[in-house]
Image (cartoon, rainbow, N blue to C red):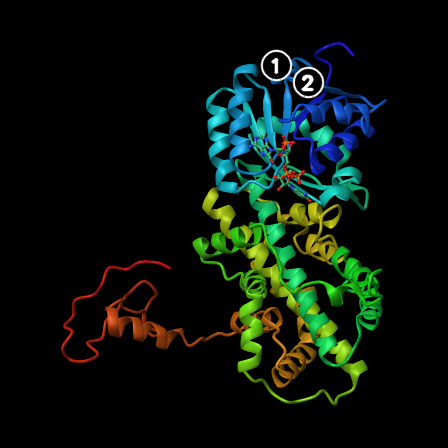
Amino acid sequence: MSNGQADIGLIGLAVMGQNLVLNMADHGFTVAVFNRTVSKVDDFLANEAKGKSIVGGHSIEEFVSQLKQPRRVMLMVKAGKPVDEFIEHLLPHLGAGDIIIDGGNSNFQDTIRRCAYVESKGLQYIGTGVSGGEEGARNGPSIMPGGSPAAWPHVKDIFQAIAAKADGEPCCDWVGENGAGHYVKMTHNGIEYGDMQLICEAYSLLSAVGMTAPEIAEVFTEWNKGELDSYLVQITSEILAKLDPETGKPIVDVIQDTAGQKGTGKWTVISACDLGVPVTIIAEAVFARCLSAIKSERVDASKLLKGPKAVFRGDRKKFIEDVRQALYASKICSYAQGFQLMRAAAGEYKWNLNYGGIAQMWRGGCIIRSQFLGRIHDAFGGRKKVVNLLTVPFFRSATRKAQGSWRRVISQAVKLGVPVPGFMTALAYYDGYRSERLPANLLQAQRDYFGAHTYERTDKPAGQFFHTNWTGSGGSITAGTYTV
Ligand code: NBP
């Protein structure tokens, strides 16, 4: 192949990069590749890429010379410093209008900074979320691009061709300016943490009433046929059914109960705190992983701290249905919180997010893909303004139907001493969100008592602030108002 013919270049030949390149080649695009460890370029060309429309460079210069103009260079490298380093290596070899795309799990704040920097050099920048892991990258991921709007028409055909499809529509569309794509991907990952935690709590409750992993696998298989139909429920049933070839036991029973995390859930919660949005289910999911990680402390504490002696004596079949409803209602709350978070971020960072479009992007290819996202897509149809998904008729009726079960499950968990932080915080959010009056009146009084922070009154217009001289000795001086 002659130089300058590749439609796109990709740097970073690890699991995601290689599979994306093969996916692009399958869709008729010519792809140039490069990697820090250059020997991986030759290995790839000689093996997986053999006979396909894929070329390789042994230096950045050679790689760039293989690209059509405007040059499109996608980075699929480890998030963080490697992205900044590659941008610096690339800039001297690229020109006005060329496009640098970061497809890794970068922090959206880094993407905002990099987008401004690359644009200041006369180039275009895209920060895009890519979800679906190895399998998604190969056969159709969910792709969430944001950055320089003028770059989108130049990558749209490639991205939409390689993306997953749901009802024939690509799970990829333009998200918004600068860090919007990576923000939406971060929120996706946060929601993924929530979904996984809620599923684990359902499994934990069913185990606590005496069910074995293969029995619970069957329950998940059934659940996957209804409202909970999703990739994560499907793989959960497969995981629970799998036996360990060494011991013959269910493999989940021999896997250590300490969870890892790479940080996108934590970023979601940090952003939620910054924006003042209660994403309590994702927060509990992050903290549940933290609690799981202190295994040796838990082992010691298990010998010291006693729980209830209760055993389950109810109807197991009814309980299984109650758990299903509790899982469904909690999941609705988690997505309601996630979309509230994106709405607040859109206001803060001036992004014009299309929430129905985001639900569509998540319907296929990614880890949280589900039938349920189709309902969310419909709820936002035609860019309908939705303050909170909980108030949409479909979800209102679903939570109303589920709440008896939800409350019974949590009561049972408390009686049995089974931790279900996700279910509990979801219900607390539901009850809090539907409360016309919360005990924050007392909280404001406390703040005013010790810090003269003032309060508003129910019988006076909002925006007027009052202070009480609670002890008779504090005087009428008030503290400056601050938020958070
Ligand atoms: P990794 O995140 O493991 O990154 C490997 C690539 O980064 C290799 O090309 C490696 O080059 C390069 N690299 C590293 Br490591 N340090 C570097 C440095 N200091 N300078 C330059 N290059 C460096 O690969 P991955 O799992 O394919 O993920 C790629 C991106 O996609 C990441 O941001 C990841 O978070 C994101 N992502 C991953 C998944 C997944 O399921 N794995 C899913 C969705 C998104 P080398 O070959 O020379 O070491």
Q: Quadrant of residue 176?
A: top right
Residue topped by disc 1: 61
Q: Amino acid at mark 2?
A: Gly
> On the rendered image, what quadrant is the C terminus found in?
bottom left
Q: Residue at x 28, y 65 (%)?
A: 464
Residue 288 spot, x, y in % from top left:
58, 65
Quick check: can you spot residue 371? yes
Q: Residues within 10 Å of mark 1 (few under 14, many from 20)?
A: some
Tell me the crowding category of disc 2: few under 14, some 14 to 19, or many 20 or more residues within 10 angstroms, Cα based: many
User: Which x, y percent locates residue 461?
Assistant: 33, 67
Residue nearest the viewer, comparing 303 with 128: 303
- The residue beneath circle 2 is 57
Residues at marks 2 and 1 touching, judged by CB atoms closer than 8 Å: yes
Find out if the beta carbon at label 2 lies less than 8 Å from the nearest ligand 1 atom. no
* SS state under label 1: helix
- Residue at 46 percent of width and 46 percent of height: 348
Q: Residue furthest front?
A: 246
Quadrant position of ligand 1:
top right
What percent of the width, then of the height, locates residue 394?
70, 65
**Figure label count:** 2
Residue 65: where, in percent of width, then height? 65, 13
